[in-house]
Amino acid sequence: MTDAKEPLTLSPKEAAPMVPMGINQFYAAVRQGTVPSLKIGKSIRIPRKRFIEWLNGEAIESTPSDAA
């Protein structure tokens, strides 16, 4: 269960320091679909749970149905 103090999503600037790449590389990985992400309006959000799974190598790739 997720701690109530932890947000469900992260901004790219919050998530980028958790991986060994710069912010520009991180945004490129988001655009390529390598990093799981959601686009809400003009904002890009990183779902915390899926991002952690991706970091641990458990997630294969993001799917368009996840945005629904």
Image: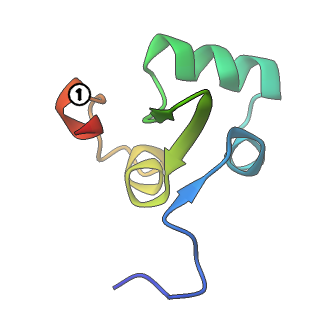
> Which residue is label 1 attached to?
63
Q: Residue at x 40, y 60 (%)?
A: 49
Spot occupied by residue 64 in the image (x, y as percentages of width and height) = 24, 25
Q: Residue at x 55, y 42 (%)?
A: 45
Q: How is the image coloured?
A: rainbow
Label 1: element kind: loop
Q: Looking at numbered disc 1 in the image, what kind of residue is underneath it?
A: Thr
Spot occupied by residue 22 in the image (x, y as percentages of width and height) = 82, 27
Spot occupied by residue 62 in the image (x, y as percentages of width and height) = 30, 30
Q: Residue at x 29, y 36 (%)?
A: 67
- How many discs mark residues in the rendered view? 1
Image quarter where the C terminus lies is: top left
Describe residue 25's horizontal placement relative to residue 38 as left or right: right
Query: Height in image: 58 above or below 20?
Result: below
Say which quarter of the image contains residue 61.
Answer: top left
- Furthest-front residue in view? 41
Q: Residue at x 75, y 29 (%)?
A: 21
